[in-house]
Image (cartoon, rainbow, N blue to C red):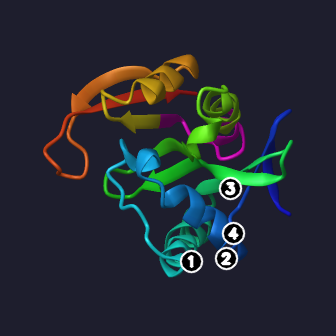
């Protein structure tokens, strides 16, 4: 297992194709996608495609991406967290997504602080951004807790909606 980050409760590692059932579990939940703008996946095959066509490609092309988050007390993948290079805007975004039963436990904050350190110290990034919908209060609070500050409200993905754009510098 290629551990990227470890905290008291969590392990972050690269996804493998064998994680498809866990990816399906958290990506098929309506409440998980309420503020993402992403599709709710409806098949195991789509979970496999996300792993191989997006995450594994990101690791290969950029050296990082969204990582599997394993909750150590249960040895269970509960979602993803990590950095994602957005070539269309030449920025690196921090993001996280977890099963709802793990919300409100400080997991996103705990792991995101370590991810920012990893981005600056290991990847030598100078800036990391976070993009979220204003109505996603939980995510807005996490971005604030981990040190990101608002720098604009603007569209993302040309969907006509306003998003909160935050940033942190090394």
Q: Are marks 2 and 1 in contact (CB under 8 Å)?
A: yes
- State left or right for residue 11 relative to residue 27: right
Q: Residue at x 54, y 35 (%)?
A: 126
Report the magenta residues as a range.
117-128
**Secondary structure under the numbered disc 3 in the rendered image:** strand
Q: CA distance from mark 4 to mark 2?
A: 5 Å
Q: CA distance from mark 1 to mark 4?
A: 8 Å
Task: Report the front residue among 159 and 73.
Answer: 73
Give the percent coordinates (x, y) of residue 48: 56, 77
Q: Which residue matches tag 1?
A: 48
Taking the magenta stretch, the answer to whether it contains residue 107 is: no
Image quarter where the N terminus lies is: bottom right
Q: Are marks 4 and 3 in contact (CB under 8 Å)?
A: yes
Q: Is residue 62 above or below residue 34?
A: below
Q: Which residue matches tag 3?
A: 68
Total labels: the figure holds 4
* Nearer-N-terminus badge (2/1): 2
- State left or right for residue 38 relative to residue 170: left
Q: CA distance from mark 4 to mark 3?
A: 8 Å
* Nearer-N-terminus badge (3/1): 1
Q: Which residue matches tag 4?
A: 19
Q: Are marks 4 and 2 in contact (CB under 8 Å)?
A: yes
- State left or right for residue 21 relative to residue 163: right
Give the percent coordinates (x, y) of residue 99: 59, 46
């Amino acid at each position: 297992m290629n551990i990227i980050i470890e905290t008291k409760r969590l392990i972050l590692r690269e996804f493998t194709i064998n994680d498809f059932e866990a990816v399906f579990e958290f990506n098929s939940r309506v409440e998980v996608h309420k503020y993402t703008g992403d599709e709710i996946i409806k098949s195991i095959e789509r979970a496999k495609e996300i792993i191989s066509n997006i995450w594994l490609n990101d690791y290969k092309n950029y050296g990082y991406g969204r990582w599997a988050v394993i909750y150590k007390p249960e040895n269970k993948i509960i979602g993803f967290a990590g950095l994602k290079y957005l070539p269309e805007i030449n920025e690196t975004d921090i993001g996280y997504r977890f099963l709802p039963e793990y919300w409100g436990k400080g997991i996103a904050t705990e792991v995101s602080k370590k991810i920012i350190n990893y981005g600056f110290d290991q990847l030598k990034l100078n800036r990391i951004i976070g993009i979220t919908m204003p109505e996603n209060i939980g995510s807005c609070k996490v971005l604030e807790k981990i040190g990101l500050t608002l720098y604009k409200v603007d569209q993302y993905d040309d969907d006509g909606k306003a998003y909160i754009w935050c940033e942190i510098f090394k």
